[in-house]
Image (cartoon, rainbow, N blue to C red):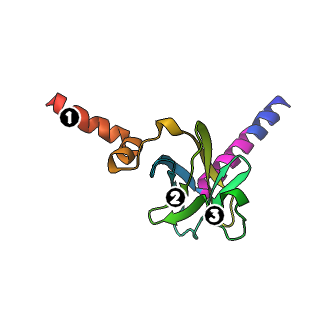
Amino acid sequence: MHQRRNLGRMFLLITVLLFGFASAQKVVQLSYCSVAENNLRMDCKFALPAESPEPFCKYTQGERLLDTTDPDEEQHAPYKNRAKARIFPGNVCRLLFKNLPKGKSNFTCNIRLADSAAVTKTSVVEKKLLLPCSAWSVLLQSCSGLLLTLMTLPALL
């Protein structure tokens, strides 16, 4: 009996893992910076299986929909003039969010193909720690390993 239960659990685990590999969509990175004093830019980089249809992207705060690229979903009314989500080449979904409130805010990026479950990644943004958007801030957030290598290279030489 105990052996059958373990076998059942193992089968369930393998099924879940295989389903995850089969869908192969994932959020690779979530980075953010400030555009102007009170505006947030958040980039959600994602990976898709080959030959995938165009994905849908949305940003949420809890149950509130900030914006989406899915025409079947409706944006939460207070965010119609404050939030805009768009998909850019290179599998990047970008959120532009106006009037970021003081303190900490959670933002969740959701990427979904038409026939599969969404993959998500959440980040906490603290307004007072937000760096301005520039090539340097993007490099700091997205390539910390490369940056560390480049900065220590002179010391090694």
Q: Please name the amino acid that badge 1 sits on.
A: Leu
91 falls in the magenta region: no
In the image, 74 versus 142, the foreground residue is 74
Outermost residue, left side: 157
| Image coordinates for residue 73, horizontal then vertical, percent | 72, 65
Whether residue 80 is situated above or below residue 148 in the rendered picture = below
Q: Residue at x 59, y 65 (%)?
A: 55
Secondary structure under tag 1 reads helix
The numbered mark at residue 94 is: 2
Q: Are the residues tagged 1 and 2 within 8 Å (C-beta)?
A: no
14 falls in the magenta region: yes
| Image coordinates for residue 154, horizontal then vertical, percent | 17, 33
Q: Distance between the residues labelled 3 and 1?
A: 42 Å
The numbered mark at residue 153 is: 1
Q: Mark 1 or mark 2: which is in front?
A: 2
Quick one: label 3 or label 2, which is nearer the N terminus?
Answer: 2
In the image, 28 versus 77, the foreground residue is 77
Outermost residue, right side: 1
Q: Please name the amino acid that badge 3 sits on.
A: Leu
Q: In this view, does 69 lie to the left or right of 155?
A: right
Q: Distance between the residues labelled 1 and 2?
A: 33 Å
Q: Distance between the residues labelled 3 and 2?
A: 17 Å
Can residue 76 be seen here? The reply is: no
Residue of label 3: 113
Secondary structure under tag 3 reads loop
Q: Please give the range of residues in magenta.
A: 10-23
The total of numbered circles placed on residues is: 3
